[in-house]
Image (tube, rainbow, N blue to C red):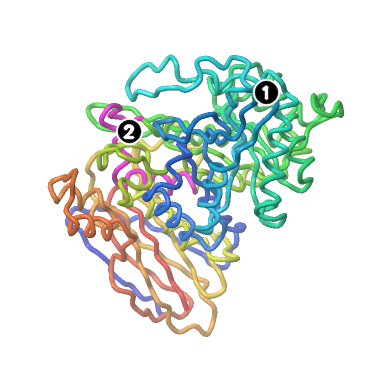
Amino acid sequence: MRILFLILAITPAVAQEPVTIQVDATQQLGSFKPIYGYFGYDEPNYTYTKNGKKLIGELAALSSGHVYIRTHFMLATGDGTPGLKWGSTNAYTEDASGKPVYDWTITDRILDTYLQAGAKPFVEIGFMPEALSSKPEPYKPIWIPGGKNPNYSIGWSYPPKDYAKWGELVHQWVRHALQKYGRSEVASWYWEVWNEPDISYWHGTPEEYNKLYDYAADGVKRAMPEAKVGGPASTGPASDKAANFLRQFLEHCASGRNAATGKTGAPLDFITYHAKGRPTVADGHVRMGISKNAEDVAKGFQIVAAFPKFKSLPIILSESDPEGCAACSARVYPQNAYRNGSLYASYEAAMMKNIFELADREKINIEGMLTWAFEFEDQPYFDGFRTLATNGIDKPVLNFFRMAGIVGVPRGERVKAESSRGVTAEKMMADGVRGDSDVDAIAVRSDREVNVLVWNYHDDDLPAPAEHVRLSLHGIPAGIARVLLRHYRVDEMHSNAWTAWKKMGSPQSPSPGQYAALEASGQLELLDSPRWIETDGRLTLEFDLPRQGVSLVQLTW
């Protein structure tokens, strides 16, 4: 039997022992759900800025499936002026007699931007309008990066003074959406109640959150019974407090007394919680904390699996990120310096594999891993905020999601991929990636192609030799004599506007020519020209993969 060896991209410093990755395209593991197609951010009013619209369009275009977008402050009171970790829509006010006044102008503008680009709303129902807050003053926060920010979680984070008015607000919002966008469209959305009610985003008890949820869910279902409502969007369950909050919420939905209807239980169509890593600075360099991210995912899966009534429900990690604060720049928080380069991309690749592996283990219905990153207006280029683009220039991490979109072909099935240097989810939860790097792969097959996503991830952001990868694949259908190879790459030198910007001298006011060059360097790049390869059902490719690099090998016929 003929086996073809193809050498792609040799770099000077290469680790000695090759990493072997074996893909068996005949052994299916389960569908490759587009869990990567979920994004979110704090500042809703950035949505319809010039760069916001540009990025929304790019996100909508990266996948053949639906891309969902979530944002905070959709019901907050204010004039729509954006700020760091703040936004407003003025959707709800009251007249002098206390009668509700609804104004959907800004909420519509946000949702219209998503829909016109081809994306879908993942609607977060929050936060508390000033006229409904049980402690409205002070109301509007000011976020100072690096400051203590004691007056951030203020009036907008309190329970309503009237739960019936809260439920009616939600009812009127869904009713308006139904009238404006149509039943079939709104039926495809998610309606999530609040955000992180186990910490300072909610100045109430768990029982008060359950009551908030009951009235919100009832408002949704009264307007549209088939609409999807869920929660609780709590923080990472690796914490006992967060785990207990998620558990008590599920118990309430299963068998508690519904505060809005008086019946037993509450509607629950999907379950959300968050999962975060914990980067630090160690010996002068960034050290990622992927173990915490993976542990959060696993603990939440285990909690849900303990409820037979809910085990089959979709789970969406409605924030899944390397750490907690998108609006904390690397200039102020040096542990966040991973955000501009390819380390962020390789981290996301490793976490996606972990999430699938952990979901398979618990037999959980994972639906999404939502990346809490967008763009910030009027901030310096590459200032190290957790973003997908900076001033309209795409960052390397966005090219990972473009790769994932290519992998996520319609009806794609994950197939067996074994690496001699892969780090299992169990080991990653226990130790992170502190010894040998995690060189691993996800392989997906559809009718006429196989895609193999390969990464070289390490927690420590330090220079290291590239890894020589030997990728062997079999299971190409009989009768196929040749396949077309496309090899995409994200690393320091490819699909990386951060490197290009530094080579220009790090301009904060790039010329039109420089800006155009940065835009081009921010796109997903082929490592080499596409080429045809002969095959008899098997083939072997060899290439070097730098530390923190990600490759996508696409084979079509």
Query: Image quarter for residue 259?
Result: top right
Q: Amino acid at mark 2?
A: Asn
- Residue 45 left/right relative to 464: right
Question: Which dot marks residue 209?
Answer: 1
Residue 240 seen in the figure: no
- Residue 107 left/right relative to 46: right
What are the residue bounds of the magenta stretch? 328-352
- Quarter of the picture containing the N terminus is bottom left
Q: Amino acid at mark 1?
A: Tyr
Residue 372 seen in the figure: yes
Residue at image coords 35%, 62%: 470
Question: Which dot marks residue 336?
Answer: 2
Residue at image coords 76%, 43%: 223
Q: Is residue 348 magenta?
A: yes
Instruction: Give whichever of 279, 295 is nearer the camera.
Output: 279
Please provide percent x and percent y for residue 62: 46, 59
Q: Alpha-carbon neighbours of circle 1 within 10 Å: few (<14), some, or many (≥20)? A: many
Residue at image coords 26%, 42%: 382
- Residue 171 left/right relative to 72: right
- Residue 264 left/right relative to 217: right
User: Where 401 sits versus 538, above or below?
Assistant: above
Magenta stretch secondary structure, dominant: helix
